[in-house]
Image (cartoon, coloured by chain):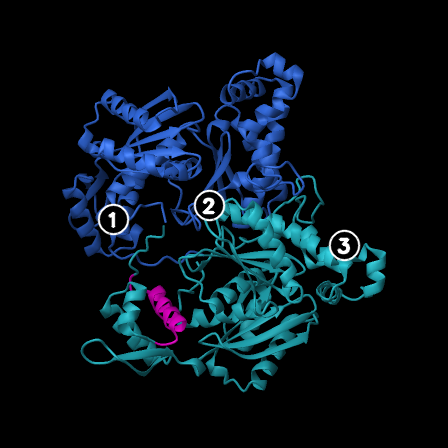
Chain colours: A blue, B cyan
Amino acid sequence: MARRETPAAGPGSRALVVDVIRSATTISRVELAELTGLTQPSISNIVRDLIADGVIHETGSADSVRGKPRKLLAIQPAHRFGIGFQLGPESVTCVAIDLTGGVVGREVVPLDRTDLPARLAARFDDFTAGLDLPRDRIEGLAIVAPEAPEWAEERAGLAGQLRIPVLFENDAAAAALGEFWSRRVSREQSFGCVYLSTGIGAGLVFGGSLFRGASFDAGELGHVSIAYDGRSCPCGNAGCVERYASMTATVDAARAEPALAARLRLDGTVSSAYDTIARAAVSGDAAAYAVIDRAAGHLAVAVTSMVNLLDLGRLVLTGPGVAVAGSIYARRLRTHLARTAHARHRHEIVVELSARPRDAASIGGAALVVQASIAPGHTLGVS
Amino acid sequence: MARRETPAAGPGSRALVVDVIRSATTISRVELAELTGLTQPSISNIVRDLIADGVIHETGSADSVRGKPRKLLAIQPAHRFGIGFQLGPESVTCVAIDLTGGVVGREVVPLDRTDLPARLAARFDDFTAGLDLPRDRIEGLAIVAPEAPEWAEERAGLAGQLRIPVLFENDAAAAALGEFWSRRVSREQSFGCVYLSTGIGAGLVFGGSLFRGASFDAGELGHVSIAYDGRSCPCGNAGCVERYASMTATVDAARAEPALAARLRLDGTVSSAYDTIARAAVSGDAAAYAVIDRAAGHLAVAVTSMVNLLDLGRLVLTGPGVAVAGSIYARRLRTHLARTAHARHRHEIVVELSARPRDAASIGGAALVVQASIAPGHTLGVS
């Protein structure tokens, strides 16, 4: 039962106003006050500043029931851009988004990890030049990868070299933000994003904010144990679902079946071998289907535990692991949740597939950059 | 990284002010403004109202560095009371607390479930009369039990009969609130409470608020699966940790060992048999110790999954299951987390034992009542 406080007119209110305008596409000041709970004078001040800063603009009028027509407000899309680079196991996915969340550019290039900061800086120059984005309208770069800590120094170096803010974000958290941003999920609803890649992560959005935990390490769904005496994991734990259901585990399982491995020629990288298995699975190869479905069944056990702990009402599956065979995972998760989730008699647990599973993390990273620039000092969607 | 909004002067601010005064014992208006982030005029208004309502009072002066001495504010403890009844498997634990959270009365009586609402109403009359609490200062009654839904009608009947508000709360959630209230945990810190009873639950406090989930069903730690092909659970799931580590499961495990069962005479109720095993375990009975320690090891697997999902920095073990042999559980959890928790290299994961494991849930229920009465329309610690 979310009893929302009337928000005060701080930086968070500015971000909230922009978020509500973006969701509505066009909206009047009166409706803004209703939807945000802010007072009319606060809305007037925030809107005036946002127009002056070029973030929003007036875009015509709506009929009013009485008195003068209401001016409608909308986001000024081409005003500012955010860049997200998602470092996958073998490639970098680069996206640029505008203030509405619209993707204005996308590119996937191979990833060479030698001298990475310099390569990323060059990549940034190429990518933004190719899109003809003026440098002074680029609000920053988000680097999105599975693990953060080792990146602290590179980030500082990169920011200095590019002379723009450089953020770091975990892939599952960024993907959750990307899905939250693109789906217009209600801020009242808690929302879980399952990110399937060579590892497994979750992004948890509670009350419109990404849940971080004590040290920015929340969402380690991959290290939920589904077998107390199960496979040992490099993390130190046993039975981690990552050892049963990640893309890596699935490729290992398929390679352990000689007939399947020979038929599908699974000798490339994990990503390419995984995509081969996934394509075979959705094309009617029974053995490939069984391998993916078994992984999905294991994933479903951990996801159900997460749902039971947090009483989630909505899940989105995203990440490269669901790009081809996402429907197999979604079906298995729905079946398992319908049979075993603790709250299943109280409410539906919606399982959705990402519309852009390979890009959600980079889009979320770029969204983070744009949000940080709209309301400095308060990053919407992050607490 | 919690970037806190400046709160506006709504009902939540009133609750926040009371909470900060309670934590500080005595505090000046200036310090209140600093700690809450509210403006001086807001603090003055709220404090004036709270004094008029008799919730707080001025209690002397502190020296000020310049100008006139600062008046100190404190909670008026005897002003209002909350009652919590926790329905255990075989008994009702009744507590009364004042506005400071101090327990002013406690009583445990056998639970007869026939015609329960009438019995609880009679119990309420007896208990409050025995404590000589004036009825007009009792803010309400919280009924605390493992499951909520079946209680809707009884609650309405009871409220009508007693002519006071009657709340219902889940035992694990109430216990978390009770522990949060009595421990003065920072609002910034996320906090998990593990409630061990005939079932297993968790209460999750994020940013000072109890996390509820989509249908008030969050915290079902007992239905986190620790074995995907494990014991089947009446909930429909397999491998639920409740089937391995609840008091009930532990009694079953001990009864399955004929020598142990005969030696300890485990033929009473689950609660009494469990207490017998727990006492034997802490008194050096190796077989009893092994049974409890095995249960603790299973509990540790599920708790580690919860810690990995939420990156918790602080856990409290509470409930009747840790009243006697809590140290065995705490030791096993600490060892397991130190070896396997994903964030273990980033921060310590503190595992504490409740000071009042059998009473935390009833105290938390009573706290909920008091909090609801201080700030109607906004229950502090609940969102």
Label 3 sits on residue: B253
Can residue B147 be seen by looking at this rendering?
no
Q: Of helix, strand and loop, which one carries label 3?
A: helix
How many angstroms separate mark 2 from mark 3 (CA)? 34 Å
Count of numbered labels shown in the rendering? 3
In the displayed structure image, the side of residue B33 where residue B180 appears, left or right? right
Label 1 sits on residue: A14
Residue neighbourhood size for the residue with mark 3, other residues' Cα within 10 Å, grouped as few (<14), some (14–19), many (≥20): some
For disc 3, the chain is: B
How many angstroms separate mark 2 from mark 1 (CA)? 27 Å
Of the numbered discs in the image, which one, if any, rests on residue A218? 2
Of labels 2 and 1, the one closer to you: 2
Residue neighbourhood size for the residue with mark 2, other residues' Cα within 10 Å, grouped as few (<14), some (14–19), many (≥20): many
Q: Residue at x 26, y 35 (%)?
A: A159
Badge 2 and badge 1 both on one subunit = yes
Q: Looking at the rendering, which quadrant does residue B257 occupy?
A: bottom right
Q: Main secondary structure of the magenta part?
A: helix
Q: Please say if A100 is above or below A308.
A: above
The picture places residue B237, in percent across and down from the top left corner, at: 66, 44
Q: Does B22 appear in magenta?
A: yes
Bounds of the magenta segment: B8-26
Residue sitting nearer the eye, A33 or B80: B80
Q: Amino acid at mark 1?
A: Arg
Residue sitting nearer the eye, B72 or B81: B72
